[in-house]
Amino acid sequence: MDTIASLFSFITWPVSWVIVQFHKVYGAIFGPDTGWAWGLSIVSLVVLIRICLIPLFVKQIKSTRNMQALQPKMKAIQERYKSDKQRQSEEMMKLYKETGTNPLSSCLPILAQSPFFFALYHVLSSIASGKTIGVIDDSLLASARQAHIFGAPLAAKFTDSAAEVAALDASLTSVRIVTAVMIVMMSASQFFTQRQLMMKNVDLSVKTPYMQQQKMLMYIFPLIFAVMGINFPVGVLVYWLTTNVWTMGQQMYVINQNPTPGSKAQDAYLQRLLKSVTQHDEVRGRRRKNIVKVIVAKGSDRNENERRFFAGLAKAGFAAQADGTVIKSDSVSVEAEGGAATRRQQPKRQTKAQRQSGSGQHPVKDAEESAAAEPAAEADEKAAPSLEKKPQSPAKGAKAGSQEAEDKPARPSRANSGGSRQAKSGQRKGQQRPKHPSSKK
């Protein structure tokens, strides 16, 4: 680790200068030799670096989302040119160029932090060994060696021996307890940050190898930091724990305010936006208007969350416009409800007798007219009863005929039954050929 840190020795002077400037401010408040003054100086260094890296963080988010969207196309290229690696690489580069995606952009914040991380490690190692470095002179070196955080010196490590810890005026037990707690907190914050990204801000409608990679990193990164953490000084653990907490908060803000399309976070965001629109009858904020504008421009390519959002707007009586605003329109809700009612209405099913009688060229219309006519007919029958025999419908006539046949058990004659059988056989066989006159009857 010392060899790697020496490679970034060119940046140790700026890092040490920034720490000293913050130490002057906090030293005037908490005392120059306290752990609060030196610890808060390191925390302020982290905050300053992360503020400077915000543009890279935004580029990382865009690159990560572009990589998620390109995973199906990348997989298709790999399958198509799996026997030609050179052509596969060319097609991949062509795809990156067309979409403006840089695969290394997702690693930019970590790569940009690396020089500062190793420079701080080099500074703290020099303090532990009693050597001046950068702008830290002998007086500042003595002050830094006296600074303790919860009983552990800034330059102490978990793997230090009892003699090395005693030289920094501390006990080995306190150093190991403090460093172990900080290592666990550092690994837990890394795991929670990655899990938050996987569970809430990933498009679950598209299953890609990228998701599996991110899931593996969710478990691998905390283990890596836990193993490496035992060789970090307490000051470096403060630095890395602070940057993890910053990343977690920054990512939480991005997930809540600018979620990935198709993710659970987008569904929650659009539901909050829908609630705000129904309360205030408008889309408040330029950023929210831009989001609605993008969704409107998608047209039929909207995902399930976006379609649900537009359905909620229509139900509330709003219509989204191309500029990201909404207008109040009663016809929108009426059309939505009318369309649902029309889909629910089904024509009444007719009986076989009604279909044979030809009563329904328009089933729905005939059903409505018959339903409207039945009350009037019943009123006329009650008011003026008639002695005339009313014609019965085919279905009722057939039913009545069968009832009379049951009431009259008279057995038909054999001749009639024979004639009926002949008639039936004639109907089945069609026209009979006449018999020869010489044939017997």
Image (cartoon, rainbow, N blue to C red):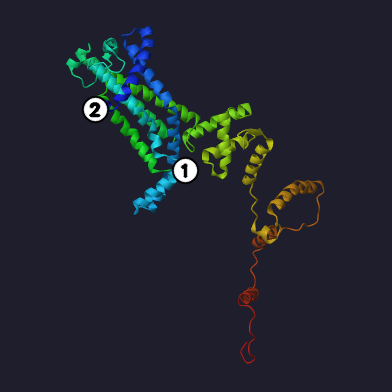
Residue tagged by mark 1? 99
Query: In the image, what residue occupies the spot 68% across and 35% down?
Result: 330
Q: In which quarter of the image is residue 15?
A: top left
In the rendered image, is residue 56 in sight? Answer: yes
In the picture as drawn, the residue positioned furthest to the bottom comes out as: 438
Q: Quadrant of the C terminus?
A: bottom right
Q: What residue type is labelled 1?
A: Thr
Query: In the image, what residue occupies the spot 48% across and 29% down?
Result: 256
Q: Which amino acid does label 2 sit on?
A: Thr
Q: Where is residue 287 shown, x and y percent of the image?
A: 55, 30
Decide if residue 145 is on the left or right side of residue 110: left
Q: Distance between the residues labelled 2 and 1?
A: 40 Å
Q: In which quarter of the image is the N terminus?
A: top left
In the picture as drawn, the residue positioned furthest to the left comes out as: 163
In the picture as drawn, the residue positioned furthest to the right comes out as: 384
Pick the front one: 341 or 208: 208
Asked if the residues shown at circle 2 and circle 1 are in contact, with their CB atoms under 8 angstroms apart, the answer is no
- Circle 2: element type: helix
Question: Looking at the image, is mark 2 or mark 1 nearer the viewer?
Answer: 2
- Circle 1: element type: helix
Q: Where is residue 57 shown, x and y percent of the image?
A: 43, 30
> Where residue 24 is drawn, which disc sits there?
none
Q: In which quarter of the image is residue 51?
A: top left
Pick the front one: 433 or 130: 130
Q: Is residue 101 above or below residue 53?
A: below
Residue tagged by mark 2? 3
